Each structure stands twice: as structure tokens, then as C-alpha cells.
Amino acid sequence: MSADISASRAGLLSLRIIAAGVVLGFCYFAASVVITLLLSVLLAYFLDPLVELLERFRVHRIVGSLLAVLLMLGVVVAAGWSLLDRVNQFADDWPKYRGVLRDAVAGVERRIMQIEQRVLEITPHPPGARSVRIGEEFSVRGLLLRGLGSIYVFLLVVSFLPFLVFFMLAAKHDLWHTTMQLFPPAERTRVKRTLENLSAMLRSFILGNMAVALILGTASSLFFWALGLDHPVLTGLTSGLLNLVPYVGAVLSWVPVVIVGLAKMTSWGRFFFVAGVLLFFHLLAINLLMPAFVGRQVHLNAVAVTVALLFWGWMWGGLGLILAIPITATIKVVCDHVEPWQPLGRWLGG
């Protein structure tokens, strides 16, 4: 009897592992579809308070959803249009930055080759042995677009986003009702509580991150303007957004400054000063701004966040880094409300 129970448990565990593998495989090979759905869900949660506010003023939900999506598109177009001139100016100045960067990279490569040569001189080699160097081309564009395949797929995804967000907003009540019908009546109260907590968590995460990004972008722009760097607004906004990435954001936020600042900052002291200020901004955001704006709705321990960033960043590149935290926080909320999975939820929260 005990052997049959053990075999049944082993079979159930095997089925769960296979199911998890199928889900992860689908997430990898159908990355553009999954990313589109996830981004649409986040945007729908972000715009839902506005639609609910319009409903209080007796605006039909379909009309309110359409207005919310149009307002979102208008803000995106206006922001892109306002930054277009700065991007064009940066593109015109790029040859100047490219030459400085090429010289800096060449100097670093020479130092590395000298170190390799010295190591080879003191390392014994068997007779007839030859060294082989394996290189892999790194592309920032490839990292950012991994999971979307190509520019064509990227444009296709972007074109679907507004329609998906509109349909999710307009049919929210029907979607909630049909989702509840998927579960037995005895479980619907717990499912409703899970969905409510999930909504609060995602809404808090999105609004809080937008507020922190605005504060960091403004502070970084003013700091770069005070230093006299070129394109302080564009550089500050980019650095502020990169600073939001947990842990590694403190280093990523240096990249725009290095690209723009190499043409003017000739001393290492100024670079260390800028790096220290950006590190201070990062620590301020992580320890004060994020708890204040995001609150305790998103409560993940450092290990869970780091593993999530590594895994989803490997899976989807730059977009994986953006979606890693909400995906992991969603898993935690679900685990907290499913009794067999509660130990995993407690581990994620730490």
C-alpha cells in the first residue's frame, strides 16, 4: 500500500515538473505573445483607476476605457515628441562620443592583452599546444529586443498593446465574473481575495515605480545640468530609469554618463564623484522612495529578486528585467493564498 502511495506521489511530482517545463518552454518560444499579454495586463491595471473615476461621473465603462487608452497614447506621443529634438542632437554629436569611446576601449583592450601576454609567458605549455580564443559578439540591441525576435515583431507587439489594454479595461467585470466561474463555489471567496490582493499589488508597483522614476529622472537631470554635461535631460531620464533596476541599477545608471561624459570629464575624480552621487540616488530610491511609494504590497526578499532578475533577464533580455519583479510578486501572492504553496510564498517574502 505504501509503495503504491509513493509511486502515486512520484508520478504526480513528475507530471508537475513536466507541466512546469512546458510552461517555461512556451514562455521562451512564444516570448512575443507572453510579453505582449503581460505588458497589457500591467497597463490595464495602471489605467483602471482612471476608468473607475470616470465611471463615478456616469461615463460608460467602454467610453471611459477608450478615453483612458487615448490619453495614454497621447502622453506617450507627447513625451516622445518632446524628446525627439534631444535625441536628434545626441545623434548629431554621436561621432564625437564614438571616437572617445573607441579610444577608451582600445586602451582597455591593450591593457588586457598585455596581462594575457604576461600570463602566457609564466604559464607552461605542452609541446605543440595552441591557444584557442572563442569570442561571442555582444549586442545591446540584441539584449533589449531578445524575446521579440525582430523590429517587425516589436512593431507588431506595440500595435496590439492598445487594443488588448482597451478590451481588458472594457470587459473587466465580465472577465472577473467568468474567472470566478472557473472555480468551485467553495473556493470563490478565496479566489476573489487573491485577485483583489493581486490588483492592489500590481497597481502599487506600477504607480510607485513611475513616481520613483520621475523623481530619479528629475534629480539626475538637474545634477547633470549642474555638471555642465551635454544633453542633461535625455541623459538624466535614461540614467534615472536604469537606476530603478534592483541592485544592478547603480551600475547601469553610469552607462549614459560614461557615453556623454567622456568627451568632457578627463579626470577620474569627476567620474568617481558622479558614480558616488548616482549610487546615493540608488540607495535613496531603494531604501526610502520605494518603501514609501510602493509600500509593503510588493514584499520580496533579496535572493528572490536577484534570482528573478537573472532568470527572466536570461529568458527575455531587457524586457525580462522589467517584468521580473511583477511576475515574481504575482507568484508570491498566488502562493500566499494556496495552502500547499504557502511555504514557497513565505520563502519569497523572506
Image (cartoon, rainbow, N blue to C red):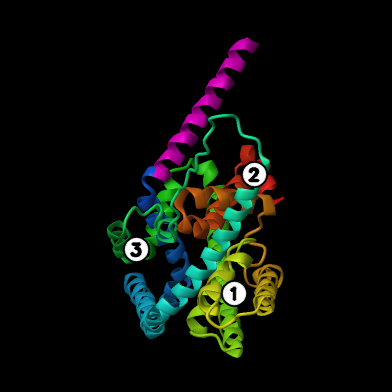
Return the mark for residue 161.
3
Return the mark for residue 3.
none
Residue in the foreground of this view, choosing between 117 and 44? 117
Secondary structure state at the residue bearing disc 1: helix
Q: Disc 1 residue type?
A: Val
- Give the residue pinned by disc 1: 212
- Give the residue pinned by disc 2: 121
In this picture, residue 263 sits left or right of residue 33: right
| Sequence-first tag of 3 and 1 | 3
- Which residue lies at the image location 43% right of the left edge and 59% below the top edge? 144
Secondary structure state at the residue bearing disc 2: helix
| Sequence-first tag of 2 and 3 | 2
Q: Looking at the image, is 155 positioned above or below residue 52?
A: above
Residue in the foreground of this view, choosing between 198 and 287? 287
Q: CA distance from mark 2 to mark 3?
A: 58 Å
- Which residue lies at the image location 61% right of the left edge and 47% below the top edge? 337
For disc 3, the neighbor class at 10 Å (few under 14, some 14 to 19, many from 20) is some
Q: Is residue 311 visible?
A: yes
- Which residue lies at the image location 52% right of the left edge and 80% below the top edge? 263
Q: Give residue 16's position: percent from left, percent from top.
A: 51, 31
Q: Disc 3 residue type?
A: Leu
